[in-house]
Image: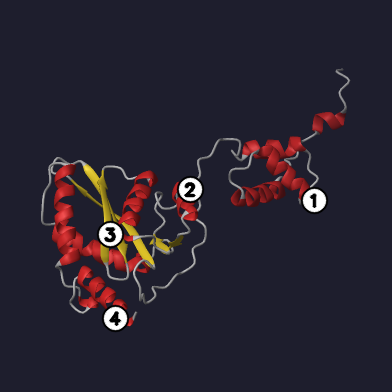
Amino acid sequence: MLEISKSTYYYVKKPKDDSQVIEVLNSLVDKHPRNGFWLLFNRLRKLGYTWNHKRVYRVYKAMGLHIVRRTKKRIPKRIKNPLQDLYHPNVQWSMDFMSDTLFGGRRYRILNIMDEFNRELIEFEVDTSLPAIKVIEALRRAMDFRGKPKSIRVDNGPEFISHKLEIWCYIHSIELKFIQPGCPTQNSRVERFNGSMRREFFHAYLFDTLDEVRVAAKEWIDDYNYNRPHKFLGKLSPIEYLEKYNLEQSYSA
């Protein structure tokens, strides 16, 4: 009566097999997480897939790929740089952060910059926030005091992988040596200093203000550099070891 074909009445819609589209899209998104639809679609075309854009976009939306995704910055693969014996100052410095809290609960950080040759703490910076700009300022002060290092060993903290620090080091011909993620022992010289400072300074005193921390830290670091004997340096302090080196250099000259 309705003049409907029997085939229309008995037709059962078959689900489309999009498994290959899903698989290829997943592989592309893993490699290029910030690419949008059209860039991914053009990549598919270059790989030789002929699916039309309507089908690919339908699968793209069903997978939730059209939703803006926040992704972490990926750290480039780091090459292991073993600690080497150092025979001269300013060959390699190292930097690292420590953190603690004031008596009132406010958190603060301290940046330590060390010359690995004689374990001398060249410069430090204390503040509640220490972005790359303040790291660069501390390095400028250290260079005014000690001259320019050939390289600086650091971890993969956001302040150290900053483009600002990278450009500043490039301009001054300083090599940044990044340790491998999760391997703090690759920066063990400054880590050992941090351990000493943690035991003898942070665990020993309470501070109400940042100014108190700065004054007390300066006093403790001066004692560390000038008076505290270091087993690796033949029980000399870092400054005494540097003076011994300078004396030997003057004799050899």
Q: Separation of disc 4 and disc 1 at Cα? A: 72 Å
Q: Which residue is mark 1?
A: 48
Q: Separation of disc 2 and disc 1 at Cα? A: 37 Å
Q: Amino acid at mark 3?
A: Ile
Q: Separation of disc 3 and disc 1 at Cα? A: 58 Å
Residue farthest toward the left in the current orientation of the protein: 205
Q: Does residue 127 sit above or below 9 in this rendering?
A: below
Q: Quadrant of residue 37?
A: top right
Q: Which residue is mark 3?
A: 122
In percent of width and height, residue 3 lies at: 89, 20
- Choose the circle earlier in sequence order: 3 or 1: 1
Q: Amino acid at mark 2?
A: His
Residue 13 seen from this side: no
Q: Secondary structure at mark 2?
A: helix
Q: Which residue is mark 4?
A: 251
Q: Which residue is mark 2?
A: 163
- Choose the circle earlier in sequence order: 3 or 2: 3
Front one among 124 and 69: 124
Instruction: Name the quarter where the N terminus is drawn.
Output: top right
